[in-house]
């Protein structure tokens, strides 16, 4: 019996190790393919110049800035709302609350909605409804907000990543021991003071983790911004939130499906994909570094 258990344990360890090796190998193979395909095109001029000649020459600087602005505005809009919602669900809502059940149902539903549906929703709600209302209220004769732009694309992406933020932040808040809450309340603190002074500081790393996951998903999504803000060719930076913008993921999609000479743009496609991955890693590493600094301060 002991030998059988030992063999079973060894088999499980071997199987899990092989599965992990397959995943790591796939990631290494994909990264190696992208690096080999884009290394000859990637240069300082490619990173700092605007596209020219129908995007078959020049660089991707407007797409880099557009992607960074999209992710930043998306995070500013989505992470606070998701955090407040998670606080309500974990700290204020009762176990039999109808509102809490409705919110959880909405979050689970949003998590399963295809990304393209968010794009259609953003077009119908933000562009045609909210944007048209803003233009009528401002009394302008030209369309400014009732058209795809950076703001509507960012808000659409914020809705897409909202379930990820809510779930991760709520789980982080639940890890804070109930004894800390009870001690704070026993010392005379109010419910909100306990949340602000005790719960949130001890769950801050989980909140940052939710932001990291949101950035990881939002930076690579293309479908939601197809109708809400991304442009095919804009050799300049967006001047305001009401302007359209270029985005790295959409740029790769256009280059691989709409280019008249795909062979001539293969290097640009690989190089753009590599830049998108590096930008996503940079944003994630920045959040991870901030999270580690917070953990160090809490440990002191």
Image: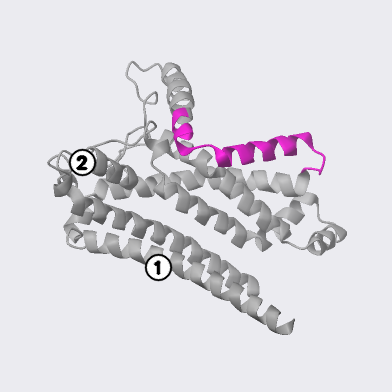
Q: Which mark is residue 235?
A: 2
Task: Tell me if mark 2 has few (under 14), some (14-19) or many (20+) residues whose alpha carbon lies within 10 angstroms of its own.
Answer: many
- 121, 81: nearer the viewer: 121
Q: Classify residue 156 as left or right of residue 46.
A: right
Q: Position of residue 266 (x, y in %)?
A: 20, 51
In magenta, the rendered stretch is 93-120
Q: Position of residue 134 (x, y in %)?
A: 45, 22
The residue positioned 74% from the left and 39% from the top of the image is 100
Where, quadrant-wise, is the N terminus in this rendering?
bottom right
- Cβ atoms under marks 2 and 1 closer than 8 Å: no
Task: Tell me if mark 1 has few (under 14), some (14-19) or many (20+) residues whose alpha carbon lies within 10 angstroms of its own.
Answer: few
The residue positioned 40% from the left and 48% from the top of the image is 220
Residue 297 sits above or below residue 144 on the image: below
The residue positioned 38% from the left and 41% from the top of the image is 222
Q: Position of residue 164 (x, y in %)?
A: 57, 48
- Secondary structure under badge 1? helix
| Res 80 seen here | no
Q: Which mark is residue 25?
A: 1
Residue 286: name its quadrant: bottom left
């Amino acid at each position: 019996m002991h030998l059988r258990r030992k063999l079973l344990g060894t088999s499980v360890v071997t199987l899990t190790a092989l599965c992990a090796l397959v995943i790591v190998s796939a990631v290494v193979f994909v990264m190696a393919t992208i690096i080999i395909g884009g290394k000859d095109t990637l240069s300082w001029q490619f990173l700092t110049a605007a596209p020219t000649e129908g995007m078959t020459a020049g660089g991707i600087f407007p797409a880099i800035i557009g992607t960074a602005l999209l992710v930043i505005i998306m995070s500013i809009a989505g992470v606070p709302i998701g955090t407040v919602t998670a606080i309500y669900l974990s700290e204020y809502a009762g176990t039999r609350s109808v509102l809490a059940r409705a919110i959880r149902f909405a979050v689970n539903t949003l998590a399963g909605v295809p990304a393209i549906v968010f794009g259609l929703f953003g077009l119908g709600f933000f562009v045609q409804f909210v944007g048209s209302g803003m233009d009528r209220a401002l009394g302008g004769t030209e369309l400014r907000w009732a058209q795809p732009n950076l703001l509507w694309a960012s808000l659409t992406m914020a809705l897409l990543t909202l379930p990820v933020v809510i779930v991760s932040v709520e789980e982080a808040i639940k890890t804070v021991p109930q004894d800390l809450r009870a001690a704070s309340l026993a010392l005379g603190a109010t419910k909100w003071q306990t949340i602000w002074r005790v719960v949130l500081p001890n769950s801050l790393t989980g909140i940052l983790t939710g932001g990291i996951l949101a950035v990881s998903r939002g930076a690579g999504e293309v479908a939601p911004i197809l109708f809400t803000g991304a442009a095919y060719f804009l050799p300049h930076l967006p001047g305001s939130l009401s302007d359209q913008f270029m985005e790295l993921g959409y740029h790769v999609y256009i280059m691989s499906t709409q280019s008249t000479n795909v062979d001539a743009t293969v290097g640009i496609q690989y190089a753009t994909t590599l830049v998108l991955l590096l930008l996503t890693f940079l944003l994630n590493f920045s959040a991870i570094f901030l999270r580690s600094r917070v953990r160090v301060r809490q440990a002191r």
